Amino acid sequence: MTHAINQNPLFYQTSADLPLVNRAEGIYIWDESGKQYIDGCSGAVVCNIGHNDKTVLTAINDQARSSFFTYRTQFNNRPAFELAQNLVKHSAAHLNRVFYVSGGSEAVESAIKLCRSYYISKGESSRYLFISRSPSYHGSTLGALSLTSYAPLEIPYRPLFKSWPKIPAPYCYRCKYQMTYPSCGLACAHALEQVIEEQGPENVAAFVTEPIGGASSGALVPPEDYFAVIRNICDRYGVMLIFDEVMTGFGRTGRLFAYEHWNVSVDIVALSKGMASGYYPLGAIMTREDIVQNVLSSGGFPHGHTYAGNPMACAVGVAVLKRIIEDRLSENAKVMGDRLMRGLARLAEKYPIIGQVRGKGLLTALEFVQDRESKRPFPTKLQVNNLITANAFDNGLIIYPRRPINGLSGDHVLIAPPLIIKANEVDEMLQRLDAALAETTADLQKAS
Ligand code: PLP
């Protein structure tokens, strides 16, 4: 049976009328009308190696001639081995085991379940609580949402999951304790100890955190000694430290993995996004040998997703990682990130609506305020984050809007272009942003 369709049947979060994409190359995307955009946020901070990379296209073609999909309980495959070996080679020495998934939420779910399985295997089955931060984003599935603190995305679903305890993120610009670093003594990090004590240390399994806050907090870089304090608390209470590097991994912040910035030893790391840079769904968790051995020798890890470790996903992962390493894209992210941050600082001098410029490498953000002195946010109804994003889009620049005050108020945008970006392209991006900021300032003056 067939019938006529006269409407777009697709639906996502909103049903906005969007341009149709025609093609993409490097940092650029063209729509069907011929308009060109700079992909200033790599999609959703995904396309680390940029669009239409020929080495990845060749790898996809080669793999397609061999096999696309085989199931992990029936066959091993060479790309899966090769990718795991390369990941281990470029990771902290103790992170030597790899478990594949197909996306960020799956990686976070897998980290939660591996951690829980480990404590059961060690006879510490009372440990079931996961502490995380507010604001934070760890994914859209119910387990990952229970770690997330971003009101509009989690509140409607709260009856469906257990919302785990949260500590304040190190959001120094709007410090929860109204203190200033370093005289605050890192109160937000020490809050972890307090929450562990409140919950009963014997019940706590792990602290889960984004190393540099992503979409929910806007490129939130913690103070230098933050993770030393966190690691110390975790060690004293036998609690795992899980890093959600879904957004920060694969060169984004100027190192291959963000944990390298502070040399912090993490027990499990969740990866996705840049791992296949948008060429295929792919993610993973990496962890220590003893954790895996304990779990496998006490009945196995009863968890997995259908597409895990399939040959095509892993072949893409191999090609993407090779590109990131051989072309030193982490180093480029650092150099271009510094250039971008300098340019953003210049824009902040020109436009008083910019309250703060923050970030590391090519994960950067602008937070907007009505008044710099008081840091008063714009009224929510003005939707300044969406206004600036729409103005940037009109000027041929794609950026990523969110709200830093738990998703409820405040305005920020992420600026996180592909790591292949060149100096003249950073400058071009800044020019388009400049035009968008001028228009937004004028729009806001009209509205007031
Ligand atoms: N964790 C972090 C830090 C993220 O930024 C995201 C997505 O933005 C996720 C997890 C969820 O990833 P996915 O949307 O691939 O499920």
Image: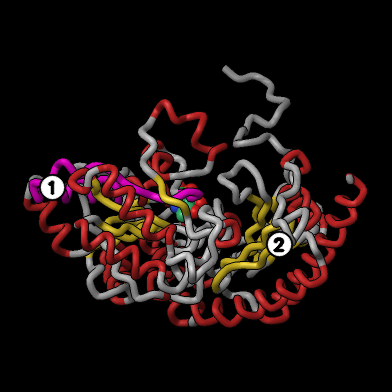
> Can you give x and y, in whole percent of width and height, for residue 265 in the image?
29, 69
154 and 252: which is toward the camera: 154
How dense is the environment of label 1, judged by Cα within 10 Å: few (below 14), some, or many (20 and up)?
Answer: few
- Which three-letter amino acid code belongs to the residue tagged 2? Gly
In the rendered image, which quarter is residue 85 located in? bottom left
Q: Which residue is mark 1?
A: 300
Residue span colored magenta: 110-137
Q: Residue at x 50, y 71 (%)?
A: 253
Q: CA distance from mark 1 to mark 2?
A: 50 Å
Residue extending farthest to the right is 446
Asked if the residues shown at circle 1 and circle 2 are in contact, with their CB atoms under 8 angstroms apart, the answer is no
Please tell me whether mark 1 sits on a helix, a strand or a loop. Answer: loop
Could you tell whether 323 is left or right of 85 in the image? right
**Cβ of mark 2 under 8 A from ligand 1:** no
Q: Secondary structure at mark 2?
A: strand
State which tag comes first along the sequence, 1 or 2: 1
Q: Is residue 193 magenta?
A: no
Circle number at residue 355: 2
Instruction: Note whether 418 is above or below 138 in the view shown.
Output: below
Can you see residue 289? yes
Q: Nearer the viewer, residue 122 or 27?
A: 122
395, 320: nearer the viewer: 395
Residue 430 in picture, x, y percent from top left: 75, 71
x and y percent of residue 69 in the render? 34, 50
Q: How is the image coloured?
A: secondary structure
x%, y% of residue 173?
A: 60, 61
Residue at point 28%, 66% (across, down): 232
Residue visible at 68% across and 78% down in the picture = 342
What residue lies at 71% left-to-right and 38% top-to-bottom? 16
Point out the frontmost of discs 1 and 2.
2
Q: Give the amino acid type for the residue marked by disc 1 in the picture.
A: Gly
Q: Residues within 10 Å of mark 2 (few under 14, many from 20)?
A: many
